[in-house]
Image: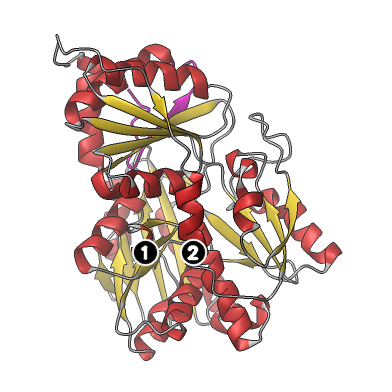
Amino acid sequence: MSIFKAYDIRGKVPQELNATVAHAIGRAAGDYFGASRFLVGTDDRASRDELFSAFTQGLREQGVEVLSVGRVSTPILYFSTAEMAFDAGVMITASHNPGHYNGFKFCRKGAAPVPQEELQELRRRAEGGLFEEGKPLAPPVTESDPFPAYRDFLRRHIAFTTPYRAVVDAGNAVCGLFAGENLALTPLQVDPLFFESDPSFPNHEPNPLVEENTAALRARVRQTGADLGIALDGDGDRMMLVDEEGAFLQGDLTTLLIALGLKEMGHRDFDVVIDCRASRVVEEILRAEGLGVTKSRVGHTFIKTLMRRQGSLCGGELSGHYYFKDSHYTESTDLALFTILAMMERRKASLAELWRPLARYPQSGEINSRVLSVEDTLARVRRDFSHGRFSEIDGLTVEFDTWWFNLRPSNTEPLLRLNLEASSQDQMEEMRDKVLGVVRAEGGEEA
């Protein structure tokens, strides 16, 4: 089953993922997780009911009691799994993928992540029909409303009183069903954009990392004079911000602002986990502030595992995932937003005034190259840039005094993803082209 990815399960419906496959995954999960109680939530895709019914039937056939929290975001599913002390939880979602996709995101007790090797064991059992037979059928699925407990959690973390004006783009995805009520707990004045649920995503795909998908949001912010724009992805576990001038704030600098904001709130001597693509400025500033910094492989399972091991207060990724100890070491776009709004209020500064002084180094953005051999290409890069400082937290990172790059393989295809940063725009462009020249030297091409 090619739908089993590094961090979750995703595929086209019904070609790759359908009721038969979902039922097999449910039975495999019922056995493998050893859970007596499983919490299940869904996003609002057209295939949610079919997959939910088949998956939960599979769980029940393995004797697992199932409770449904209905249509929620992934952070709410994680929060509810931990708060309600369930043995395991799953969100039926394809995150930011187009509407004809769906999938599953699993977590264990306490919302602990499920790593790639466990997903592959789940795959082996589902494909091979390796289920324990003869278990008594569990009772029918019951339902519970997760929002009262979740909104109590939000109220405890609202630390600003200024009625900032925010355009919020829900992308016609599941967060539009409840984001308005959640944010109504705060002083925010919300201008809702694409809150109407539509599984076809008629306005744009729910992926805020793609520039064209935030065009309407950026235009609305500028037109209305809003203080900021907020773009959510398809299952609400990623958030990207737009400042009052319509400029896009990268996830690594958002993570930096969150950490600085938490320090200003009184937290001391804590550790921050960042992914290995983050700007050099993040580590420079956090260490200057006396905070610990740990670099991680890209991906929520790796960052959550590191945070749990170290008791880290927060973490974040370039892709717009932000993690908090207070939310059981899982994503919380709400806590990320509240922390930054409190910082704006405390400093009496706009979002642009907060982040723009931090953007010291020009970045290439992520550039994909299709190559004939990942191993041969990385060996060629190691040879041609052997005078740099090497690390292999995730792929290959090569550092020099005034520039650095990370070259990271795809988990599923012969692609290498380049992120490069330098001290000046001219140097960034020169080194970007030089590295790409080596990567694409022997049959490689833009992907």
Q: Earlier in the sequence, mark 1 or mark 2?
A: 1
Task: Tell me, yes or no, whether the highlighted magenta stretch contains residue 405.
Answer: no
Image x and y of residue 403, in percent: 43, 77
Inspect this view and state whether residue 437 appears: no
Q: Which mark is residue 136?
A: none
Residue occupying image coordinates x 54% and y 36% = 97
The range drawn in magenta is: 1-18
**In front of the other: 348 or 370:** 348
Image x and y of residue 179, in percent: 62, 49
The image quarter containing residue 371 is top left
Q: Is residue 145 left or right of residue 184?
A: left
| Residue holding disc 2 | 335
Image x and y of residue 241, in percent: 62, 63
**In front of the other: 22 or 88:** 88
Residues tagged 1 and 2 counted as in contact (Cβ below 8 A):
yes
| Residue holding disc 1 | 326
Q: Amino acid at mark 2?
A: Leu
Q: Amino acid at mark 1?
A: Asp
Q: Which quadrant is home to the N terminus? A: top left
Image x and y of residue 232, in percent: 59, 51
| Measured Cα–Cα span from mark 1 to mark 2 | 9 Å
